Amino acid sequence: MKYVILVSHGTFAPGLHSVLKMLAGGDRSDIISASMEDDMGADDFIHRFEEVTRSIKESDEIILLADIIGGSPLTNALDFLSQKGLLSNTIAFGGMNLPMALTAAMMKDGMDQENLRSSLLIEAKNAMMEMELRIKEDEDEI
């Protein structure tokens, strides 16, 4: 099985997970989230991460999406996956956003790892743009 795992500081990962439930088909066992909340140390996060990833086996694949590269949630998740022998089947990204996570959830089973990797980066980058605002002036103004 291929899993999408979301990790973050605060409630970003669980919030994004909630949106994925709305857009990607309900409560799916292949989408998991864990967050490092206020006053939570690394050991507490690792314990939480271990709980939510308990069903993952060595033969499974993992797409790990994190809020930022180098952040504690990502580095601790990678350390844990390494200790469990799961790192060789993992691809990891920082800077997750909704289009990236939605692409991972919807396309992960239909693409090989290299095409999926490329698609995730393209979706994440293409989602970032400024919205051009045009204000129509009221013709009746004096």
Image (cartoon, helix red, strand yellow):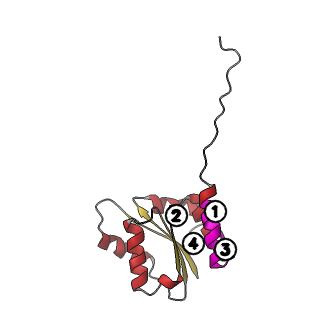
Residue wearing tag 4? 28
x, y percentage for residue 10?
39, 59
| Mark toward the viewer: 4 or 3 | 3
Circle nearer the N terminus (1, 4) = 4
Task: Give the alpha-carbon distance from disc 3 to disc 2, as whole Å.
Answer: 23 Å
Kindly indicate whether the residue at mark 2 contacts the one at mark 1 (C-beta within 8 angstroms). Answer: no
Kindly indicate whether the residue at mark 4 contacts the one at mark 1 (C-beta within 8 angstroms). Answer: no
Q: Nearer the viewer, residue 111 or 60?
A: 111
x, y percentage for residue 107?
66, 71
Element type where label 4 sits in the image: loop
Q: Quadrant of the N terminus?
A: bottom right
Other-residue count near label 4 (Cα within 10 Å), few / some / many at <14 / 14–19 / ≥20: few
Residue wearing tag 1? 122
Element type where label 2 sits in the image: helix
Q: Which mark is residue 8?
A: none
Residue, far top: 142
Q: Residue at x 52, y 62 (%)?
A: 96
Q: Main secondary structure of the magenta part?
A: helix
Circle nearer the N terminus (2, 4) = 2
> Magenta span covers which residues?
105-124
Vertical placement of residue 139 versus 124, above or below: above
Q: Which mark is residue 17?
A: 2
Other-residue count near label 2 (Cα within 10 Å), few / some / many at <14 / 14–19 / ≥20: many
Circle nearer the N terminus (1, 2) = 2
Other-residue count near label 1 (Cα within 10 Å), few / some / many at <14 / 14–19 / ≥20: few
Instruction: Say which amino acid is labelled 3.
Output: Asn
Kindly indicate whether the residue at mark 4 contacts the one at mark 2 (C-beta within 8 angstroms). Answer: no
